[in-house]
Amino acid sequence: MKHRCHFVLLASLLMVVVPAQARLGETLSELQKRYGKPAPQERTNKFNAVWLLEGEDGALMYSVTFDAKGKSIAEGMKPVRYAKFTNETVRLFLETQLVPYRDSKTVRTVKPGEKYVFGGKEYTTMAEEIVVVDDANDLLLVWTKAAPPSVMAVRSVMMQ
């Protein structure tokens, strides 16, 4: 119970700092309700959308890839130019993605240098990464701390 209270408090505090985050499986229309129209792209592609989100620490690029059914299968965030990429922003992204898997017995955090399996393939966590994987529920979260920093959530179809 104490852990759940901390999660709720952390998420509510972070929502003040960063716009509400999306979750894998959402549609373009659901994302547009939250973020508005995606940023214009040089090449229009119905399977990708990008938003530029302004926060207290500068602009963040939020990119989403959709499958043929229109559901998001990959989402990522990274700072634009000189924006700061705070730990709080990344934690909110990760926690939001993990909400549906809160009670999963198969979700785990992988240590740097450790191997893990996702989508039937074996990977190794790099030194500057934090990886959370739940292969049984088709979820991979990767926070790359090395420059340029980024965080992403993907389904296994993106790794094929």
Image (cartoon, rainbow, N blue to C red):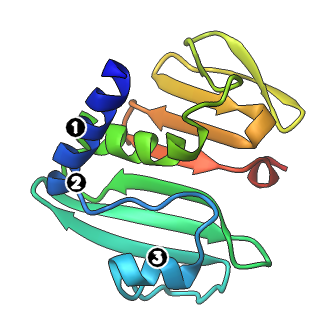
Locate residue 122, reporting x and y percent: 82, 25
Q: CA distance from mark 2 to mark 3?
A: 16 Å
On the image, which quarter does residue 44 sit in? Answer: bottom right
Q: Are marks 1 and 3 in contact (CB under 8 Å)?
A: no
Q: Residue at x 24, y 37 (%)?
A: 10
Q: How far apart, in angstroms, are the residues tagged by discs 1 and 3? A: 24 Å
Q: Residue furthest front?
A: 1
Nearer mark to the viewer, of 1 and 2 = 1
Residue at 12% of width from left, 53% of height from top? 57
State the SS at label 1.
helix
Q: What residue lies at 38% left-to-right and 74% top-to-bottom?
A: 51
Q: Nearer the viewer, residue 17 or 117?
A: 17
N-term mark: 2 or 3 = 2
- As helix, strand or loop, the secondary structure at mark 3 comes to helix
- The image position of residue 138, as x and y in percent, is 75, 43
Disc ID at residue 9: 1
Residue that badge 2 annotates: 15
Q: Secondary structure at mark 2?
A: helix
Which amino acid type is marked by label 1?
Answer: Leu
Q: Quadrant of the N terminus?
A: top left
**Left or right: residue 34 compared with residue 106:** left
**Amino acid type assigned to the residue bearing label 2 in the image:** Met
Closer to the chain start, of discs 1 and 3, is: 1
Instruction: Tell me if residue 77 comes above or below residue 111 in the rendering.
Output: below
Relative to 90, 58 lies left or right: left
Mark 2 and mark 1 in contact (Cβ < 8 Å)? no
- Whether residue 134 is visible to the viewer of this picture, yes or no, is yes
Residue that badge 3 annotates: 31
Q: Quadrant of residue 120?
A: top right
Q: Position of residue 71 (x, y in %)?
A: 68, 71
**Spatial separation of the CA atoms under disc 1 and disc 2:** 10 Å
Under mark 3, the amino acid is Leu
